[in-house]
Image (cartoon, grey):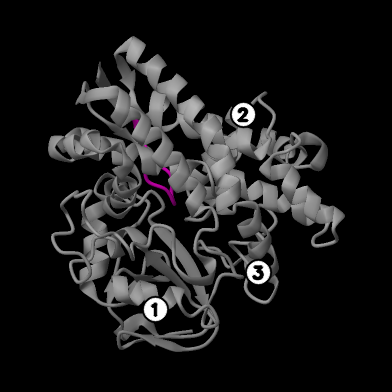
Amino acid sequence: MTDASSAPTLDFDLFSADAMAAPDQYDDLVRETAPAVYLARHGVWAVGRHADVHAVFSDWETFSSASGTGFTNIRKQGNWRQPSLILENDPPEHGKYRRLLSRILSPAVLRKLKADFVATAESIVDSALDRGEVDLVADLAEAFPFAALPDAVGFRKENRRNLLIYSELNFNAMGEKNDLYRAALERATPILDWVVENCRRDAVAPDTLGSAIFDAVDTGEITEEEAGLLVRIFISAGMDTTINGIGFTLEALARHPAAWAQLRADPTRARAAFDEGLRYRAPSPYIGRTTTRAVDIGGVRIGAEEKVILFLSAANRDPRQWPDPERFDIERKTSGHLAFGFGIHACVGQMMARLEADVLMSTIASKVARIELAGKPSYQRINWLRGLSSLPVRLERA
């Protein structure tokens, strides 16, 4: 353990209503105080500068994922679910599962999915245009991924809202065990068995991403139980983050008419706009590691078996890395943003998320002349996630 009494220290509740209402303010505070800051309220370390976050991601041997990527050290304290074979695992075991998912999510596979994604996106956007005034979140940012991804994985169509209930618990559980976590656990407890059942071989449709994972059982690459855990990743890490990333990007485009005009003029820039949206407002603002030995971060000494929380949102708006970081600019070179992480634990599904965003946003840019805010936004309160819960908008058909 480190004696934090002499270390740079901040004392605030990261998950309080005040902190969640002004996330950029607290991101800036963490980033600008020191390369590594001790958060006394939570007993963890925070790192918010881009170079330091990148360095931590690059050193999995010192900064382990296997003890959990949230506040809880799952090796010592246990967890509410079985550990993720990808997110909460280190080499050598980690590599086997990552290689399998990378193959299943290969560029060739994603190209085959694109035609169905385009048809789904066109239907959703046309429906929104017919109504004129819609909720940007429910009717666009959520509606498309919530249809496209579960279909691609092969989940049954019945009771799909359970997927979001489960995902919300997952992100709340990564923070403090506070009222948000307890409420999410109460909502999700009745459907936990449903999630397990719907990640089994007989529950996923044939010729889908889910069935491809179970094909690897037949070739002896993984076990039946491991296959179910890999299918579960699409629920716990593949839904809310994409929905919230698209929502934040569409909100930014609505608030920046010049950027919207750029995208309208060239809808092929949708993917670049999404990456800038992720840099500008990271939907998954934190990720945790556990030190395996004593280590220095920017001259700050941290002991072994300490939790280090990487502030991805702060790093993505670090003025040391990004000129004018508070400006939303779809022409910005965003290579190096950390919304998907970096290194061996970088998000294995990031190209799927980019495909979903590209298809939906390019369809919107082709069909919608203008997005006009029609009300005030409301925001989610989830420990380990940021996103809009609602934003009324008016759409004008092109």
Magenta segment, which residues?
382-390
- Cα–Cα span, label 1 and label 2: 38 Å
Asked if the residue at tag 2 contacts the one at tag 3, i.e. Cβ–Cβ closer than 8 Å, the answer is: no
Residue 82, percent across and down? 70, 56
Q: Residues within 10 Å of mark 2 (few under 14, many from 20)?
A: some
Q: Is residue 3 above or below residue 397?
A: below
Which residue is disc 1 drawn over? 55
Secondary structure, mark 2, is loop
Q: Is residue 246 left or right of residue 189?
A: left
Q: Nearer the viewer, residue 178 or 332?
A: 332
Which residue is disc 3 drawn over? 94
- Cα–Cα span, label 3 and label 2: 29 Å
Tell me the kind of residue under disc 1.
Ala
Q: Residues within 10 Å of mark 1 (few under 14, many from 20)?
A: some
Residue in the image at 62% along x and 37% along y: 152
Q: Quadrant of residue 27?
A: bottom left
Residue 242, percent across and down? 45, 43
Secondary structure, mark 1, is helix
Secondary structure, mark 3, is helix
Residue 384 lies in the magenta-colored region: yes
Residue 303, percent across and down? 46, 85
Q: Quadrant of residue 373?
A: top left
Which residue is disc 2 drawn over? 160
Q: Nearer the viewer, residue 157 or 290?
A: 157
